[in-house]
Image: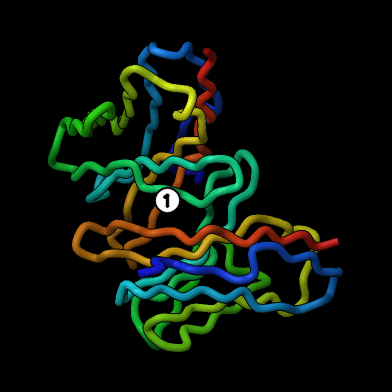
Amino acid sequence: NAGVTQTPKFQVLKTGQSMTLQCAQDMNHNSMYWYRQDPGMGLRLIYYSASEGTTDKGEVPNGYNVSRLNKREFSLRLESAAPSQTSVYFCASIRQEVAEQYFGPGTRLTVT
Amino acid sequence: GEDVEQSLFLSVREGDSSVINCTYTDSSSTYLYWYKQEPGAGLQLLTYIFSNMDMKQDQRLTVLLNKKDKHLSLRIADTQTGDSAIYFCAESRVEGGKLIFGQGTELSVKP
């Protein structure tokens, strides 16, 4: 049981490049989330997926798209990266009975 | 995390108790959480409290909830150097099971 896994761990992009951050969970959770973490700002929700086939915007969705490929996988895409998207990105899934979120190890992204 | 507020720093001596405070805004939150983040790592769930409880104790951790004042605290007894980390409080929202996080409190434990 690996929990929540994320790839890659680190990434450097040039402005305007695109990339997809991958996330998978093996706990059979329905809901999955993408957050970004910036110094002094805690974690802010980018997008979430309450169940397979649905996605909704969070607090800071601009510049991102998501795909809930199946129950296990929830990917985050940056179509045209900007320096403001330099951040640490965390994926999470939820154990619904107690709304307990499990986090992945994070992806540290730098956009130059 | 504009809706959840925490002080940014706390420094204590090893063996003392630490108290980390948090205020939140949504009175309909069902659960409130404390997460720990060590340098370079993800978030680890420490404990949570259901909104109809006033207190929860789990070994060295005590969570106090004052619903009237929308105030949550985490007390760590006998603080150790291994407790040095950033601690986040979070409130749950009914819609989509979303969590709203505070900015995090950096706890520094001095020997």
Q: Position of residue A102 (x, y in %)?
A: 38, 59
Left or right position of B58 against B79: left
Instruction: Residue B50: give x, y in percent of width and height.
Output: 19, 45
The percent coordinates of residue B33 (x first, y second) are: 32, 44
Q: In the rendered structure, which amino acid carries the disc numbered 1? A: Ile
Residue B75 percent location from the top left of the image: 32, 24
The relative height of residue A76 versus residue B55 in the rendered view (above or below) is: below
Subunit ID for the residue under disc 1: B
Tell me which residue sits at (29%, 44%) in the image.
Answer: B32
Give the vertical position of A101 relative to B20 (above or below). below
- Pick out the residue farthest to the left: B52
Q: Residue at x 35, y 58 (%)?
A: A101
Of residues A60 and A38, the one drawn nearer to the viewer in this rendering: A38
Q: Which residue is mark 1?
A: B100
Is A13 placed left or right of A107 in the picture?
right
Name the residue nearer the viewer: B95 or A92.
A92
B6 relative to A36 in the view: left or right: left
Number of callouts: 1
Left or right placement of residue A9 versus residue B60 in this view: right
Way the structure is coloured: rainbow
Q: Residue at x 47, y 29 (%)?
A: B82
Against B49, residue A32 (above or below) is below
Category of crowding for the residue at label 1, using alpha-carbon neighbours closer than 10 angstroms: few (below 14), some (14–19), many (at least 20): many
**Residue at disc 1, secondary structure:** strand
Q: Residue at x 39, y 26 (%)?
A: B21
Residue B19 sits in quarter: top left
Residue A40 occupies quadrant: top right
Instruction: Please tell me in which quadrant of the rendered image residue A92 appears.
Output: bottom left
From the viewer's side, name the closer residue of B49 and B26: B49
